[in-house]
Image (cartoon, grey):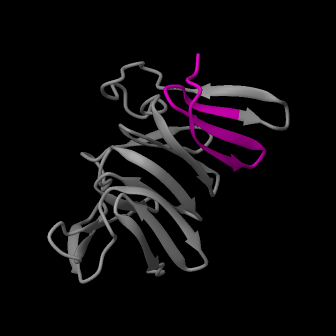
Amino acid sequence: MHEPWTYGVCTGGDRIYIAAWGGGVIEYNTANGQFRDYTDPDGEMELDLFPDDGLVHDITTGVTFSEDILWTGTYFGLSRYDGTQWKGYFDHDSGLASNFINFLKARENVVFICTDKGLSSFDGQTWVTYQKNENNKSGKIVTDNDQQHTEQAVSSSISHNFVIGVDFQDDMVWIATSKGVSRGELLNK
């Protein structure tokens, strides 16, 4: 039985994906009218016992679909599904700012992940996290990939590290936080 709360919905091809609080992800196939559930297969709600066996947790907070990839946010990590295989990402083994994900949005091959410790983005190889300095308006940009970890101080930053939502308008990114809205320019690097 699924909880009646839905935290997100997105379309992908002939499918509709629903993030159901406590129910994982529900897929609706518009071509055949069938539903399919994706839930945490090991059923362990405190940690992911078997990496990459499916959705990392049943408490889902969002879904987004782009470039034939379904991304699912939970309060316990991030899941990626390419239609065949699942991959889980966690703050201790990737560049993800926090496992506590509030929302996520994919744009082309990059997923933007709203967490309680900043805004992370991931293109499949490189993680970039934007965080605010708690003492002033400056911030930092943290970059992680297989080769290196770097931190760059910046003079301006997001409004707060508790990021609730993100969306795009042309080359602008809009970021909703617990202490206001921020706007930035997307750069192709």
Quarter that holds the N terminus: top right
Quarter that holds the C terminus: bottom left
Residue span colored magenta: 1-27
Residue 4 in the magenta stretch? The answer is yes
Q: Is residue 62 left or right of residue 12?
A: left
**Residue located at (49% from left, 62% from top):** 166
Please state the horizontal and vertical placement of residue 43, each as a whole percent of the image: 42, 18
**Residue located at (67% from left, 26% from top):** 36
Please state the horizontal and vertical placement of residue 135, each as a whole percent of the image: 14, 70
Residue 68 in the magenta stretch? The answer is no
Classify 31 as above or below 155.
Answer: above
Name the main secondary structure of what is drawn in magenta.
strand
Query: 164 or 140: nearer the eye?
Result: 164
Please state the horizontal and vertical placement of residue 39, each as a whole percent of the image: 52, 26
Classify 170 as above or below 1.
Answer: below
Q: Is residue 162 left or right of residue 68?
A: left
Query: 74 or 158: nearer the eye?
Result: 158
Q: Residue furthest front?
A: 179
Image quarter for residue 132?
bottom left
Please state the horizontal and vertical placement of residue 92, each as a whole percent of the image: 24, 45
**Residue located at (28% from left, 55% from top):** 117
Query: 59 or 67: nearer the eye?
Result: 59
**Residue located at (46% from left, 62% from top):** 123
Classify 55 as above or below 80.
Answer: above
Image quarter for residue 184?
bottom left
Count how many numbered circles sit on residues in the image. 0
